[in-house]
Amino acid sequence: MQHDLTQGSITGRLVGMAAFIGMGLLFQTLYFLVDLYFVAGIGASAIAGVGLAGNAFFLCMAASQMVGVGALSLIARAIGAKTFDQADGVYRQAMVIGLGLTVITLVAGYALAHAGLHLLAADEATASMGVAYLYGFLPGLALMFPTNAMGSALRAAGVVRPTMMIQTVSVLINVVLAPVLIAGWGTGHPLGVFGAGLASSIASIVGFVWTVWIFGRCQTIIANPLKLPRPDFAIWKKIIGVGLPSAAEFLLMFITAGVVYGVIRHFGPEAQAGYGVGSRVMQAVFLPAMAVSFAVAPVAGQNFGAGRADRVRRTVRDAAVLSTGLMLVLTALCHIRPDLMISAFAHDPKVIEIGSTFLKIISLNFIATGLIFTASGTFQALGDTRPALFGSVSRLITFAGPAIWLSTQPWARLEHVWMLSAASVFVHMLIALFFLRRELVRKLAGLMPREAVPV
């Protein structure tokens, strides 16, 4: 059942939602980690290829954020204002957009995968492995859009436990299928890295069907999740207006990751493999702070819609404190024994060394990243995600350009690329905090509780 997030303890709401969101994000990330684990035995080229192809996730995530973030922001504020018909209308238009993006992803993915991966791969073997993996994984990526639309609507209503359970079971399905499809356990027909992608796609299909089934059973605001209306371009404009800056933010992450792969390609497939594993582990480490920021959006969004400025401010403050504490602990863990986390998904000593060095250096920006996530969740709640985009653009300026120049220098080492990345995140944090303070002052000035507004 949906929750009224305008009542009760702010910290309790954040922690309660973040716990389930974090578990869901963990199991979502495990799709990639499971794949990396089972393809590690094939070799460094397979690890590098899977890591390289996995960056398509950021591209699809960018497009899904355009729908999901916009829908969540509008639906949460509508629920807070008790305008439930508006919430229903926004959800259905978000689903129409999401299904359209599903078709586009499949067509464009199969048409462009070969050329795109050959452009960035260190060698032919890495490119071939990446293409094979992506061909299997594309159906799962395509289903991200309608699944995210449903998940955003549920999160806006304060419902997070069912989606966590679905993601848990989906990952278990992937774990079971991965060795069967990759190595041919029990079948005698190994599919290699294509089987890794296919296992994830099958698990995603099961998750999508299950989400459709439970959608109307865990909230009463929106029924019949696949009932589609005619396109309403006025609502599309609102959804995209809020979500597009977040989409651009993830697109810039995709571009940044592509720059890294291009910059380090002359260091060989081991470097790309080490970065691929290290970046996936980093994403898993980020999950606690991401979970808190994902909880900020519905909690602050409902309270903003209800005119509760005091609760919006407390939500931001409590989230920042929680995120900083979590990231401080995780930074310490990554400095003590980063090799333990990397060696779980790679066996080549050189790959482990490169991945461990990456994780140790990049962990210096964990606290900054947590604060960036908190600011991003707040921007979503307030219905203006453009400030988050400004911070991401700064990373393109402070990292991508210098990194490309660095790659041309004979004295440059991989460590220099990692340190440059960490420094650019710190600049991103400063920009995010500046806009966070400005937006809170602007959007909350004169805000009154809904029941106190004169009729």
Image: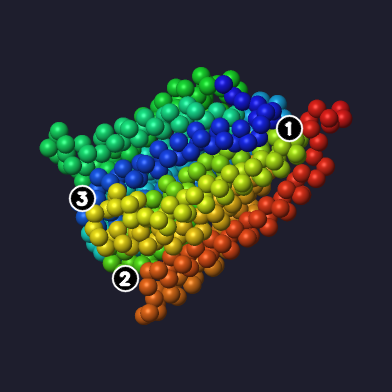
Residue that protrudes farthest toward the bottom in the picture: 410
Of the residues tagged 3 and 1, which is closer to the observer?
A: 3
Q: Quadrant of residue 125?
A: bottom left
Q: Earlier in the sequence, mark 2 or mark 3?
A: 3
Query: Is label 1 in a helix, a strand or a loop?
Result: loop
> Image height check: is 105 above or below 232?
below
Residue labelled with disc 2: 266
Residue labelled with disc 3: 41
Q: Quadrant of the N terminus?
A: top right
- Using the numbered discs, state the Cα–Cα distance from disc 2 to disc 3 in whole angstroms: 23 Å
**Circles 2 and 3: CB atoms closer than 8 Å:** no
Q: What is the x, y in percent for residue 439?
A: 72, 50
Query: Is label 3 in a helix, a strand or a loop?
Result: helix
> Image height check: is 89 above or below 403?
above
The answer to whether 452 appears left or right of 432 in the picture is: right
Q: Tell me what residue is drawn at x 51 percent, y 58 percent.
A: 365
The answer to whether 224 appears left or right of 46 in the picture is: right
Residue labelled with disc 1: 306
Number of marks present in the image shown? 3
Asked whether the viewer can see residue 149, the reply is: no
Q: What is the x, y in percent for residue 261?
A: 37, 63
The answer to whether 229 appears left or right of 142 in the picture is: right
Label 3 CA crowd tier, 10 Å (few <14, some 14–19, many 20+): some
